[in-house]
Amino acid sequence: MSPSFQLQCHFILIFLMALRGDSRYPELREAADHDPLLLLSASLKRELAGEPLYRRALRCLDMLSLQGQFTFTADRPQLHCAAFFISEPEEFITIHYDLVSINCQGGDFLQVFDGWILKGEKFPSSQDHPLPTTERYRDFCESGGIGRSIRSSQNVAMIFFRVHEPGSGFTLTVKTDPNLFPCNVISQTPNGRFSLVVPHQHRNCSFSIIYPVAIKISDLTLGHLKGLQLKKPSAGCGGKGDFVELLGGTGLDPSKMMPLADLCYPFHGPAQMKIGCDNTVVRMVSSGKHINRVTFEYRQLEPNELENPNGNSIREFCLSI
């Protein structure tokens, strides 16, 4: 397992715990100098219904899970900044430029990325996102965008920015919109239940859980018969155009993760597996010929389950990377 990604995932877990109101973790300002995901707040998540638009300052390294208006003002040259946004699985994220005062000719920039990037790995992967990678970047300095809105294709998005001159900066408004058929999701929580539905669309969808988890699949509807098989080196779903796979690994990009199990045929009734990886992904591949649906529950593994795996579990692969 890569120690650097293990550390990154640890702090992602702290952030996601903060979303649920766990305030045991202090802000990690010193560590944040080295990784954009390490600056976390334990009070980001709150209900906004009926309240005025939430406003606060945006940090050079930040992560946000709520709607509102966020302003960044440089107090010194800030050359390597990023802010990560995450919403509920059934939501898109819209980023609106309210005010931008940066010097594009002087080397400043402000970019929106449709998804997340961490240490060169992308979510969604290039195979799963509807746009080519180059089109997932929206550069303010190249297009000019005051009053312009940019909507993500899933429940995560981020911005990169560089501001040299003290006093320069920008203001953004972040809002969410309903997504009737979520495709590509990062879960905010270590436990939950979700149905991934792909209705007659030729696309791939990944649901990412940044925890070691037990997965229980209760229902799978595809265009053909019945069964669950563990993957062998040369095994697979035999060229079928519609299937679900379970992936595990230590990175963010599903295309770089290890296929652990194939679900090639429809079934009703639980099929479960424990996956002791830092990141677990349920990925559906659809030909567009059918309405495909997979319903699953997941829960974070307890420490004793990681130390003493038994039953239908996969842990050794993740420990050996």
Image (cartoon, helix red, strand yellow):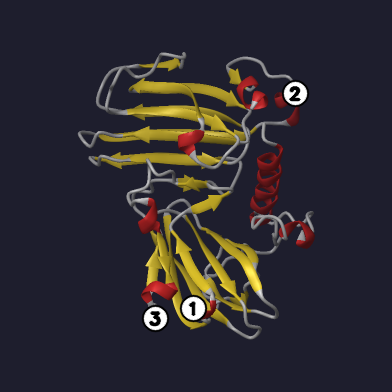
In percent of width and height, residue 217 lies at 46, 28
Ranked by sequence position, the earlier of labels 1 and 3 is 1
Name the amino acid, label 1.
Answer: Cys
At a point 46% along the width and 65% down the height, the residue shown is 112
Which numbered tag is attached to residue 147? 3
Q: Residues within 10 Å of mark 2 (few under 14, many from 20)?
A: few
Identity, as a three-letter code, of the amino acid under mark 2: Glu
Q: Are marks 1 and 3 in contact (CB under 8 Å)?
A: no
Residue in front for this viewpoint, 120 or 316: 120
Tell me if I can see residue 303 in this picture. yes
Q: CA distance from mark 2 to mark 1?
A: 52 Å
Query: Residue 92 at what x, y percent from top left?
Result: 41, 59
Q: Please identify the residue farthest to the front as the structure is shown.
A: 106
Identify the element where label 2 is drawn. Answer: helix
Mark 3: which amino acid?
A: Gly
Task: Report the side of 24 relative to 244 (left or right).
Answer: right
Q: Which residue is mark 1?
A: 104
Observer able to see residue 52: no
Between discs 2 and 1, the one toward the N terminus: 1
Give the distance between the C-alpha atoms of the residues marked 3 and 2, in whole angstroms: 53 Å
